[in-house]
Amino acid sequence: MAGCQAAMTDTPKTPQTADSTDTDLMIQSRLRRWPVVVSSLFVVMIVAAFAATIIRVPYVIFSPGDATPVEGIVNIEDAKTYRSRGQILFLTVSVSSGRPNLWRYAWASNDPDSEVIGEADYLQGQSQKAVNQEGVVQMDESQLLAKKVALETIGYSVTVTGSGARVIEVVPDAPASGSLKRDDVITSIDGVQVRLRDQVGEIVRAKPAGATLLFTLLRDGKTVTEAVTTREATSGELRGKPFIGIIATTEDLEVEFPVDVAIDPGQVTGPSAGLAFTLTIIDELTAGDLTGGNKIAVTGTIDADGNIGEVGGVPQKAATARAAGATIMLVPRSEVGLARPTAGSMKVVGVDTIDEALKVLQRNGGRLVIPAAPAA
C-alpha cells in the first residue's frame, strides 16, 4: 500500500512541472511581443491619420458662414440718412475651396449644420474659375438691383437700361451647349424682350424644366434664332429649377441713380444678399426703424421689379442667423421649409416681394416713414 501511495503521489509531479514551465514560457513570450504589437498599432494609427490628412476627396462642403450687419457696408451720400437701433444681417455660406481631406469630409458628413455634395454636381460642368466669375457678376448685379428697388420703393426715379444679355461662357454639356455661343447677345426669349442679364433667368424659370425656348441672338453682327430645351438643375442655387447653363452679363448696362449709394461686401460673391441690401438702403433713407431694435437676418435675391428669388445654402444660413442671435429671419417663401430645421427658436418668415418683406418687418416691431417727396 505504501508503494502504491508513493506511486500515486510521485506520478503527477512530472507533468505538472512541465505544464507550468510551458505556461510561463508562453506568458513571457507574449509579454515580449506585446510592446511590438502596441508599437505596430501605433504606427498604423499614425499612418492612417497622416493619410486622412493628405488624401483629398471630390466633394464640396457647405457650412455656416457669417452674419454681417449691412449698415456697416453701405455708404449713402447726397441724402439725409437715419440710424436704426437694431441690425439687418446678410448671411453667407462657407463653401470649401479645393477638395477637402478625409478628416474634413468625415466631420462635415456628421455635422447637422453642414451639407456635402459631389464636386461634379456642384460644378455642373463648369470650371471652378467660371463658378467664381459668375458669383462676382451676380454680386455686382444684385447691388445695382437693390439700389434701384430701394430708391424706387421710397419714391425716387431710377433709370436702368441695357441692350441684351451677353453670353460670356456656356457650360459644357448644359442645355445651351451647342446652341448658344460665347459673345452671343440674347435680345429676346420666346418673343419676350431681354434688356438685362437677370431677365434671362426669370424667363427660363417661368416655364417648367423640359420646355423648349426660342432665343433670338445677335451673333457676329447677324440676328439668329436658336432653340434650347431646359433641364432641372441638380445642385447649386438653382437646384430643382429649370436652367440652360450660361454665364452672362448685361450688354451696355447703364443705371442713373439720384442718390449716391455705395456697397462694399468685401470678398462675398453671389446674388443672395440682394434683399438685405434693399431693406438696409430703405431703412437708412427713411425715418422710423425697420428693425424695431432687433437683429433681422435676411437672405434672398432681388430682381428689377422687387420680386424675391431663391438662394442656396438656406439651412446653413439659418444656422448662422441663429448663432448670431437674430430674432427673425426673412427667406424666399418657397425655402421656409429648408430654414426651419436649423433655425432653432428663431422665427422664420417667407416673402415673395419687397412689399411683403416691409410688411413683415412692420408687423414685428419695425416702423417705416417714407418722406412725402424725396429730393430728385
Image (tube, rainbow, N blue to C red):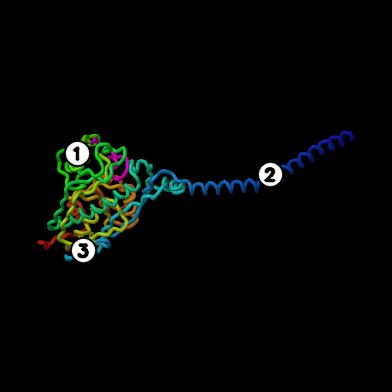
Say which residue label 2 marks. 30
Percent coordinates x, y for residue 297 in the rendering? 28, 55
Percent coordinates x, y for residue 224 in the rendering? 18, 38
Percent coordinates x, y for residue 92 in the rendering? 32, 53
Mark nearest the camera among 3 and 2 is 3
Task: Report the disc number at residue 251.
Answer: none
Q: How far apart, in angstroms, are the residues tagged by discs 2 and 1? A: 79 Å
Amino acid type, callout 1: Phe
Q: Quadrant of residue 152?
A: bottom left
Q: How far apart, in angstroms, are the residues tagged by discs 3 and 2? A: 79 Å
Say which residue label 1 marks. 215
| In the image, residue 236 lies in the stretch drawn in magenta | yes
Mark nearest the camera among 2 and 1 is 1
From where the camera sits, is residue 208 visible?
yes
Say which residue label 3 marks. 76
Crowd tier of the residue under label 3, counting other residues whose Cα lies within 10 Å: few below 14, some 14–19, many 20 or above: some
Q: Is residue 373 left or right of residue 52?
A: left
Crowd tier of the residue under label 1, counting other residues whose Cα lies within 10 Å: few below 14, some 14–19, many 20 or above: many
C-beta proximity under 8 Å, tags 2 and 1: no
Could you say which is closer to the camera, residue 262 or residue 238?
Answer: 262
